Image (cartoon, rainbow, N blue to C red):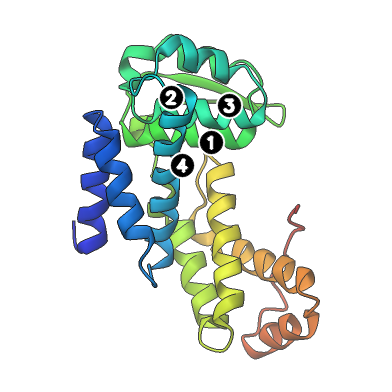
Amino acid sequence: MNNYYDKIIFKIKELIEDNNITQAKDLLDEELKMPYIPSLYEEELIRLNQTVNSLIKLDDDEKEISIIKIEEYLYGNDKQQLQAVSALFEKNLRNHIKLVQDYLDSKPNKEAASLLIDAMIEQELTNEFKYTKDNLEYTFIPAYLSKPYESEGFIQADKLLQKWISNDNPSMYEMCLQMLIHKIYLYLPLSYEEDEADILALSILKKISSLLGDDELYDEIVDKYGLKNIKIYEIES
């Protein structure tokens, strides 16, 4: 742990694991009130805050969420699935291997499934799992997968976006970064390789430029950095 936010996030996760939900919530509220939080850490703090809120909301009468309640929500609507997966972050998933695999077999909400796989990676599960997404079946062992923020593709794509736009257009960079984060999570259990970073970053820049109605800026960046030969792909909204 290299800095203040690493230590804070580690402490919050410890509190959640020990079922000290109120303390975790108080610490999160304190940190999220800060006027500036580095983007990567802010995303993690927001996710942890969602987890804590879900733990509170799923059952106001009990701070310890029953696995039966979680299972009920796992097979509910998209919002309920996200709430249930957030609650599972607080559980030792090694005790719920069958529940995890059954959920992955149920054609789950993609975002919820991605967050669950992230939790499986975080807990370094050594079981083999199967997950079908977009008609492709993936077999994977979470302990052997890269954490999304640590993948070479993400790191390099972020560096490219910083180089291209962070100084001249920081708000646009933040939008690109948020889309990049969303993409790397939805890509799980796969991760982007370093040699995919330029295509990924430029495709995201094109999408954000179009959403902002600023295609001229995109063209300027392509010309400035000699990116015309990179074949981008369309990113869905």
Q: CA distance from mark 3 to mark 4?
A: 13 Å
Give residue 50's mark.
4
Dividing the picture into quadrants, the one containing residue 66 is: top left
Give residue 60's mark.
2
Mark 3 vs 1, N-terminal side:
3
Looking at the image, is mark 2 or mark 4 nearer the viewer?
2
Q: CA distance from mark 2 to mark 1?
A: 26 Å
Q: CA distance from mark 1 to mark 4?
A: 15 Å
Q: Position of residue 202 (x, y in %)?
A: 65, 69
Give residue 81's mark.
3
29, 129: nearer the viewer: 29
Looking at the image, is mark 3 or mark 4 nearer the viewer?
4
Q: Amino acid at mark 4?
A: Gln
Q: Amino acid at mark 2?
A: Asp
Q: Are marks 3 and 4 in contact (CB under 8 Å)?
A: no
Q: Quadrant of the C terminus?
A: bottom right
125, 169: nearer the viewer: 169
- Can residue 24 be seen from the camera position used here? yes
Q: Position of residue 134 (x, y in %)?
A: 71, 32
Q: Is residue 102 above or below residue 182?
A: above
Q: Amino acid at mark 1?
A: Ser
Give residue 114's mark.
1
Q: CA distance from mark 3 to mark 1?
A: 11 Å
Considering the numbered disc 1 on the image, is that residue within a helix, a strand or a loop?
Answer: helix
Q: Are marks 1 and 4 in contact (CB under 8 Å)?
A: no
Tag 4: Cα neighbours inside 10 Å, few (<14), some, or many (≥20)? some
